[in-house]
Amino acid sequence: MATSSPGRQPQNDGCHTVSLSGHVGFSSLPDQLVKKSIEQGFCFNILCIGETGIGKSTLINSLFNTSFDDPVSTHFLPNVGLRAQTYELQESNVLLKLTIVNTVGFGDQINKEDRPFPKNPRFVNHEKPRQQGKADSISKTQLQKFKSKIMSELVSNGIHIYQFPADDEAVSEINTMMNGHLPFAVVGSTEEVKIGNRMVRARQYPWGVVEVENENHCDFVKLREMLICTNMEDLREQTHAQHYELYRRCRLEEMGFRDIGPENKPVSLQESYEAKRHEFYFELQRKEEELRQQFVQRVKEKEAILKESEQQMQSKFEQLMLMHQEAKLELGKKKKVLEDQIAMFIEKKANAELLQSQASVSTPVVSLKRDKDRKNSNFI
């Protein structure tokens, strides 16, 4: 594409030229991104961890002011499972694809009989032991101590939690203040209770009503504003940058990919990956060659066995042929002897028949002579 600059006319080479007026149009990029994002919608994944019956589903329903279809789980599961369900929510013209991952069976394998709970003698007999210690069942003084205890435990165990960003001037003040309220003590409810002449979402107890959206009663509004309205995108980015990348790095290190080279020099994971890939490729080639050699060796062994077998068969065949020839010669000799005996028998038979025939001819002559001699004697 040909362009022109101020004070200079391009040569007309047959191409269409466009003169810049000073406005490039970069300012429209955010609008384009917003339009594309609205068309595609947004994705948000929430992993909600807590023991069965603690109020996870109620909290999610309260946050998004929607009744999600979440099946009730039993309290006696043998292990923990993850159950993910995806919903599509729409507010104005914005589409949100929300995936809620629930920890089914979490905490059901722990014996909770002897664990301590802050108790309030005013209502302790009205609540089940497993419900004590919640934000709507302890005093504000106990709640503040409980919050401090939780933060202390997190710090002492090196557990890092999400901090609302204070580097953005637009939300720096509110986020800094909200970081001081962490962790939030939240009460959730989808039921409406009549207070005066208005209906509010609240929880009704024998000792009073806890309004969900009353900041004097709980931190639900703070959580919803900070999570959904103010810092959702930053939370997504931080989750990806800190948690996912940390998980990815740990998994890569478990697989042998490290960001430190042989001489303790820093290397990128990409370089480490490439080095590992080449190492794996060469190892694969080595194993392939080893397998090929083993295959060739086995083929040679099989050929040697077959050759030896063929030689044995050939030797056995030759022995059988020799035995056959010897038997054939022996049979020929016996046949010759038998033929000689047959010839001798035939000859003897012929001689016997000749003698017999000669004897039969001589017998009448002798008889005739005797008769003549007898007659002659009579005449004398």
Image (cartoon, rainbow, N blue to C red):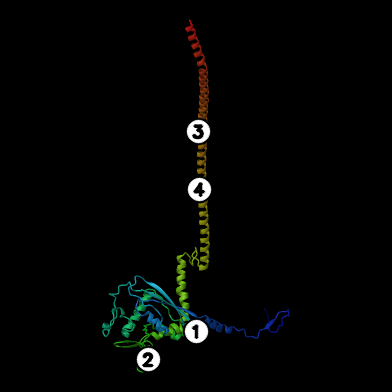
* Label 4 with label 3: CB-CB less than 8 Å: no
> Could you tell me which secondary element the residue under label 1 belongs to?
strand
Determine the image quadrant of residue 203.
Answer: bottom left
Question: Of the residues shown, which amino acid type is indicated by label 3?
Answer: Ala
Q: Position of residue 118 (x, y in %)?
A: 29, 80
Question: Of the residues shown, which amino acid type is indicated by label 4?
Answer: Lys
At 40% across and 73% down in the image, what residue appears? 82
Question: Of the residues shown, which amino acid type is indicated by label 1?
Answer: Val
Q: Nearer the viewer, mark 1 or mark 4?
A: 4
Disc on the earlier residue, 4 or 3: 4
- Separation (CA) of disc 4 from disc 3: 36 Å
According to the image, label 3 marks what residue?
327
Q: Is residue 274 above or below residue 90?
A: above
Q: Position of residue 267 (x, y in %)?
A: 51, 67
* Label number found at residue 94: 1
* Label number found at residue 302: 4
- Separation (CA) of disc 3 from disc 1: 104 Å
> Could you tell me which secondary element the residue under label 4 belongs to?
helix
Disc on the earlier residue, 1 or 4: 1
Question: Of the residues shown, which amino acid type is indicated by label 2?
Answer: Met
Q: Is residue 294 above or below residue 65?
A: above
Tell me, yes or no, if residue 125 can be seen here.
yes
* Label 3 with label 1: CB-CB less than 8 Å: no
- Separation (CA) of disc 3 from disc 2: 119 Å
According to the image, label 2 marks what residue?
199
Tell me, yes or no, if residue 183 can be seen here.
no
Disc on the earlier residue, 1 or 2: 1
Label 2 crowding class (10 Å Cα cut-off): few <14, some 14-19, many 20+?
few
Label 3 crowding class (10 Å Cα cut-off): few <14, some 14-19, many 20+?
few
